[in-house]
């Protein structure tokens, strides 16, 4: 079996930067996303610079069978996933009662179900061999309720809770689970989540995808359990933990509120 790092959502944003970083550090890669063209461009770019194997899987992770199909295919190819990065995800901005139920359901399937299934499929092998690392993408959103993005914030709270619990279960096995919590980051996320009307990316500091990827990579390699990117985000999370919940809701509603035109 040959060791690989699997990254979901590698066609853009944080996943794209993580792919380049892992290639630089000499990891063979399995890159997953729906956009075949962007994945192919990334593969060409990586292979011009680094001598690593890059396998592209053009998959929609919302499809219920996708995680098992990926797992079985990689087994047939004699590929062992030593690092799993569950990065693919998106949000949806607006009032929940006016939202599209299909969009909310797709978000739950991608941000929660696909992440959980991929983790379970690849984790057994990691535990058996006593070696492996998992990086799950949550967000600072995981630490608070998100008025106007209620489902997205709740999916990230799930990712945080699930990852922390797994990290605890796996102590002493040689397998680590890191949950990466970025704040607003300049990627395709703002557009994919229909966030252009919100104050969020206008009020908050916006990080680059590259700096978030570097921070996440280092945290994962160290086996850190919770990795909150940026000092301002760490202060925000701390403040939220000591602020009464109604006040937290009030302030987040202002931050996530609609920009005045
Ligand atoms: N940007 C932020 O402000 C921010 C902050 C905190 C946390 N995050 C989290 O960071 C992670 C990465 O997001 P990003 O900011 O890099 O956003 P992005 O630029 O929109 O990238 C999202 C990636 O997920 C892939 N993806 C989306 N739907 C998919 C599906 N159904 N099946 C397979 N792949 C799919 C996209 O590729 P295709 O479209 O080609 O499928 C793309 O590669 C997400 O989990 C997000 O929630 C982002």
Image: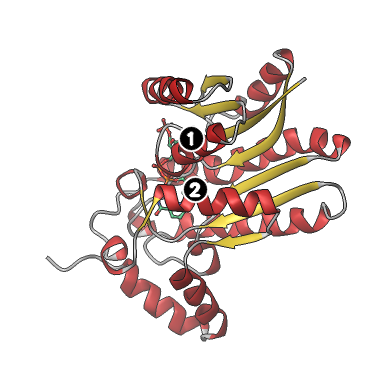
Task: Of the two numbered discs 1 and 2 on the same chain, state the one appearing first in sequence.
Answer: 1
Task: Judge from the rendering whether residue 101 lies leftward or rightward of residue 132; answer left or right.
Answer: left
State whether residue 137 appears in this view.
no
Image disc number at residue 30: none
**Which image quarter: residue 11?**
top left
Tell me the SS state at disc 1: helix
Front-most of 99 and 247? Answer: 247
Q: Quadrant of ligand 1?
A: top left
State whether residue 147 appears in this view.
yes
Image disc number at residue 20: 1
Task: Judge from the rendering whether residue 257 lies leftward or rightward of residue 38; answer left or right.
Answer: left
Residue receiving disc 2: 213
Q: Are marks 1 and 2 in contact (CB under 8 Å)?
A: yes
Q: Residue at x 53, y 40 (%)?
A: 110
Q: Residue at x 35, y 46 (%)?
A: 187
> Is 89 drawn above or below residue 10 in the view shown?
below
Q: Residues within 10 Å of mark 1 (few under 14, many from 20)?
A: many
What is the x, y in percent for residue 188? Answer: 34, 43
What is the x, y in percent for residue 108? Answer: 53, 45
């Amino acid at each position: 079996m040959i060791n690989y790092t699997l990254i979901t959502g590698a066609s853009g944003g944080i996943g794209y930067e993580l792919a380049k970083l892992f290639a630089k550090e000499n990891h063979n890669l399995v890159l997953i996303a729906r956009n075949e063209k962007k994945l192919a461009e990334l593969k060409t770019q990586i292979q011009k610079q680094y001598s690593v194997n890059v396998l592209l899987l053009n998959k929609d992770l919302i499809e219920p069978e996708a995680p098992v199909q990926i797992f079985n295919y990689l087994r047939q190819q004699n590929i062992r996933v030593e690092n799993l990065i569950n990065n693919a995800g998106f949000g949806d901005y607006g009032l929940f009662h006016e939202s599209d139920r299909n969009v909310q359901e797709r978000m739950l399937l991608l941000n929660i179900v696909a992440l959980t299934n991929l983790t379970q499929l690849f984790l057994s092998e990691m535990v058996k061999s006593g070696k492996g690392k998992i990086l799950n993408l949550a967000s600072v959103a995981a630490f608070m309720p998100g008025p106007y993005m209620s489902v997205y914030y709740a999916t990230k709270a799930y990712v945080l809770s699930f990852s922390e619990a797994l990290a605890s279960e796996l102590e002493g096995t040689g397998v680590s689970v890191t949950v990466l919590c970025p704040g607003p980051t300049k990627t395709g996320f703002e557009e994919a989540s229909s966030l252009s009307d919100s104050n969020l990316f206008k009020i908050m500091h916006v990080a680059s995808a590259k700096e978030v990827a570097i921070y996440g990579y280092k945290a994962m390699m160290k086996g850190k359990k919770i990795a909150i990117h940026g000092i301002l985000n760490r202060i925000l999370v701390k403040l939220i933990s000591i602020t009464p919940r109604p006040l937290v809701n009030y302030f987040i509603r202002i931050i996530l509120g609609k920009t005045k035109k």
